[in-house]
Image: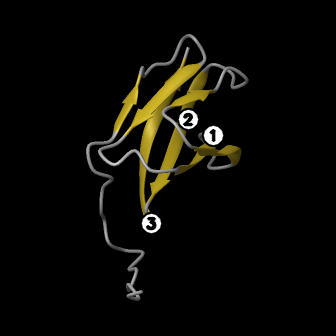
Amino acid sequence: MQAQAVDADTNQNIEELSIYPNPVSNGKLYIITKNNLTKEIEIFNVLGKSIFQTTLFGKEMNISKLNAGIYIIKIKENNISTTRKLVIR
């Protein structure tokens, strides 16, 4: 097993990341990537407070418990993380 140096400052993107629908109106969010590996998902409010955390094994995520508003979603797959804006109606 090879050890990999992980540089936290490296701005890598998850390959072929697709998050839809955005804005979300039915409480279901789909997150698809090229490799579709297990993903660590964290959602933050506009103040930067973590309000939702889960591990996603498939591609469909239920976020119906979140109120309408603007959020930041952080997706981590295979030691690469990406953040995006998420709008819930």
Q: The residue tagged with tag 2: helix, strand or loop?
A: strand
Spatial CA distance of label 2 from label 3 is 22 Å
Spatial CA distance of label 1 from label 3 is 23 Å
- Marks counted in the figure total 3
Circle 1 is placed at which residue position? Answer: 45
Foreground pick, 15 / 45: 15
Q: Amino acid at mark 2?
A: Tyr
Camera-near label (2 vs 3) is: 3
Foreground pick, 45 / 14: 14
Q: Residue at x 67, y 20 (%)?
A: 64
Q: Position of residue 74 (x, y in %)?
A: 51, 49
Circle 2 is placed at which residue position? Answer: 71
Image position of 79 (left or right of 63): left
Question: Looking at the image, is 17 positioned above or below residue 88?
Answer: below
First along the sequence among labels 2 and 3: 2
Q: Position of residue 29 (x, y in %)?
A: 51, 25
Q: Amino acid at mark 3?
A: Asn
Image position of 74 (left or right of 10): right
Q: Position of residue 56 (x, y in %)?
A: 57, 42
Circle 3 is placed at which residue position? Answer: 79
Foreground pick, 77 / 26: 77
Q: Amino acid at mark 1?
A: Asn
Dividing the picture into quarters, in which one does residue 31 lie?
top left
